[in-house]
Amino acid sequence: MSGLTKEQIVNQIIRQRGLSKAEIEKRIAEIARREGISEHAAAVMLAEELGVKLTGGEELLHISDLVPGMSNVNIVARVLRKFPPREYTKRDGSTGRVANVIIYDSTGQARLVLWDNLVAKYYNELNPGDVIKVIDPVVKEGLRGVELHANFRTRIIKNPEDPRVEEIPPLEEVRSYSYRRVRIKELTGGERFVEVRGTIARLYRVLVYDACPECRRKVDYDPSTETWVCPEHGPVEPEKMVVADFGLDDSTGYIRTTLFGDDAAELLGESPETIEERLKSLVEDGLTIKEAGRKLAEETYYHLLGREIIVRGSVTEDKFFGTLLKARTWEDVDERHEIELARRELYEAIKALEGGE
């Protein structure tokens, strides 16, 4: 197993035994101290103790193989979508930049997060449809699954020579990847990975909150330490999370829909910082934050009413709002794709009738 680095051995233990990276590192250090050997040798010994079958050479991992805590991994994927860079305030008061890029392979999707100088280095070079190899990112848990956070060690290569390239579906096939087109009247609650085409018929509210960059949950400011604190991840540098709450109508029914993050900001057409400033101005005029959220939606973003979009997500039952579509992403209607979809549905219907005869 000399061909595997310590990090690769740790990754295989994480995948095969489900232990945390911190626990594995602790046990490796204990073995190295007890046996008087290197940490690399101790990692091999720990794998043997746990019955982990180590595979040599470069691991050809896929997105579905990734587990938070992994390091020294590489992934080959295609760019599905990218969101405009935005600014954030660092702990020292300086301004940084962050940009999110959605990538996918044959097993699923992940969010690639570019920080600071890597935004300038890579963002403009990456476009939907590009195949890239992401080398040595930090794998973290996000609100919607794993995220790959690029840092100073990370390299991104376009059009790599790698056997995994041939496995990646083309962009056209994956835009509705894993999602099933349904009509709103068919939704009863609990459906996952559904796609709805409808018209924005009502705007309920628009909000912005400070979120943990790790889990996207709301964080609170601690004035005693002058830091933002996440209940799960401790002190963090927060990012602005936008929430857009609207009603969708497809002529068969109506459903309340909630969109988060970059997708929400993109739909509204403004940066999280601009939206937050609008909310602050309304609060300074005497409104509560809830009232400001409603007023902002109704008076500033009213132009969205009547806009036809495609929303993808899952349906839940909310004790306050009833049946709710929690949107994962959205896009404008592509008429050519819709014509092709209708053609396929018609073909399947005719085929079923002919079979019935």
Image: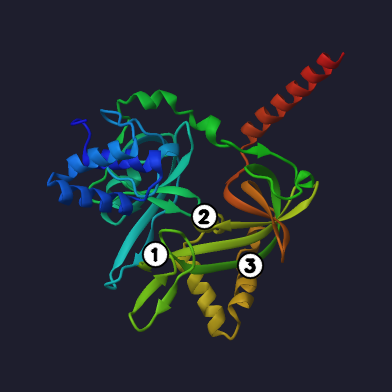
- Per the image, the residue denoted by label 1 is 233
Name the amino acid, label 3: Arg
Label 3, residues with CA under 10 Å away: few <14, some 14-19, many ≥20: many
- Per the image, the residue denoted by label 2 is 266
Q: Earlier in the sequence, mark 2 or mark 1?
A: 1
Q: Earlier in the sequence, mark 3 or mark 1?
A: 3
Label 2, residues with CA under 10 Å away: few <14, some 14-19, many ≥20: some
Considering only vertical position in the picture, is 172 above or below 295?
above
Query: How far apart are the two marked residues, 2 and 1, measured between alpha carbons?
Result: 27 Å
The quarter of the picture where residue 42 lies is top left
Residue nearest the observer in this picture, 277 or 147: 147
Q: Are marks 3 and 1 in contact (CB under 8 Å)?
A: no
For the C terminus, the quadrant is: top right
Q: Element type at marker 2?
A: helix
Please tell me which residue is depicted at 64% across the width and 77% down the height of the picture. Answer: 291
Q: Which mark is residue 205?
A: 3
Point out the frontmost of discs 3 and 1. Answer: 1
Query: How far apart are the two marked residues, 2 and 3, measured between alpha carbons?
Result: 16 Å
Name the amino acid, label 1: His
Furthest-right residue in this view: 357
| Residue 121 in sight | yes
| Residue 79 in sight | no
Q: Earlier in the sequence, mark 2 or mark 3?
A: 3
Please tell me which residue is depicted at 44% across the width and 25% down the height of the picture. Answer: 167
Point out the frontmost of discs 2 and 1. Answer: 1
The quarter of the picture where residue 321 lies is bottom right
Label 1, residues with CA under 10 Å away: few <14, some 14-19, many ≥20: few
Residue 264 placement, left or right of 188:
left
Residue 53 placement, left or right of 83:
left
